[in-house]
Image (cartoon, rainbow, N blue to C red):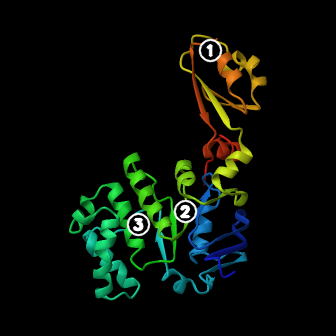
Amino acid sequence: MTAENLLAVRAINKHFGSHHAVRDLSFEIKPGECLGMIGPNGAGKTTTLKICLGLAKPDTGTVEGLGLALPQEARRFRRRIGVVGQFDTLDPDFSCEENLLAYGRYFGLSNEVMRARIPTLLEFAALRHKASARISELSGGMKRRLSLARALINDPELLLLDEPTTGLDPQARHLIWERLGLLIKQGKSILLTTHFMEEAERLCDRLLLVDQGEAILTGRPAALIAQEVEPHVVEVIRESDASSESLSSLLAPLTPMAQRTEQSGDSLFFYTHDAHPLLAALEEHPSLRVLHRPANLEDLFLKRTGRQIRETH
């Protein structure tokens, strides 16, 4: 691991019986960087995260975090990082403040240090007014914010976040995004796994797209979108069954106006460098709903991993 990398993963492989969960995967995280790991269900993201935490050992390859070899020095490594898992592990018998106090003791922090940090962390989580509230009194968004605050009790150099906003409503999700953005501005380094493409595009300096355990793309979000996807997307939606003709057949004469098309259910997607001729032609079909938008990370994700739902076992 070079001095500028907080985490360096080199050519790791992991098998579970005949299933090859992670294949020759390599990446690194630099100070002050947020790296997003995205991919379909079963792509190997959670297994990779466990390996990075020293909770699983790769069959081959190496992992170094903060200059420490993993999993050999995993306990020392975990004392210097913060972790937020997919599911809350808050103690339901404790208040918000007590949860932070109890967690801080795992890191050997003195009561004096914890008492000094807790008001700031509760303020950061917008939970000062809930300091004495028990976990059962909190909403899902509040619990996630408290979990994030708890992960900061030891002032970590690196945060590992596994789908931190799953199950939250839009308001709660945006508040978590705001808090994560503040951490990035403060220079914290983050490894983030997420299924929300907007989250990845908004927060991450770099992205790692994994599929079937392999890294298939890596780079800055905007650069990857520009590299992989045509800049204009025209989505055409059939809202009624007035015609028995399929949407793809109905609009077949328009397909030469786009670089490529994709169909999903009752929607047909046109990907093009110039949307104006296509939009003009679609005015001849007033019964269809037309949405014109710039390409985004979700378009890239679906192009490279497909639109079919993956069943995991």
- Compute the Cα span from label 3 to label 1: 49 Å
Precedes in sequence: disc 2 or disc 1: 2
Residue 243 sits in quarter:
top right
Residue 212's place in the image compared with 279, above or below, is: below
Instruction: Indicate the position of residue 147 as horizontal and vertical percent values.
Output: 38, 66
Q: Residues within 10 Å of mark 2 (few under 14, many from 20)?
A: many
What amino acid type should be assigned to the residue bearing mark 3? Leu
Residue 192, label in figure:
2
* Viewer-nearest residue: 105 or 227: 227
Which element type, helix, strand or loop, lies under badge 1?
loop
Residue 247 sits in quarter:
top right
Tag 2 and tag 1, C-beta contact below 8 Å: no
* Residue holding disc 1: 283
Instruction: Indicate the position of residue 40 as horizontal and vertical percent values.
Output: 62, 51
Residue 56's place in the image compared with 185, above or below, is: below
What amino acid type should be assigned to the residue bearing mark 1? Glu
- Compute the Cα span from label 2 to label 1: 43 Å
- The quadrant of the rendering that contains the C terminus is bottom right
Precedes in sequence: disc 3 or disc 1: 3
What amino acid type should be assigned to the residue bearing mark 2? Leu
Taking the image as shown, residue 52 lies to the left or right of residue 151, namely right
Q: How many marks?
A: 3
* Residue holding disc 3: 148
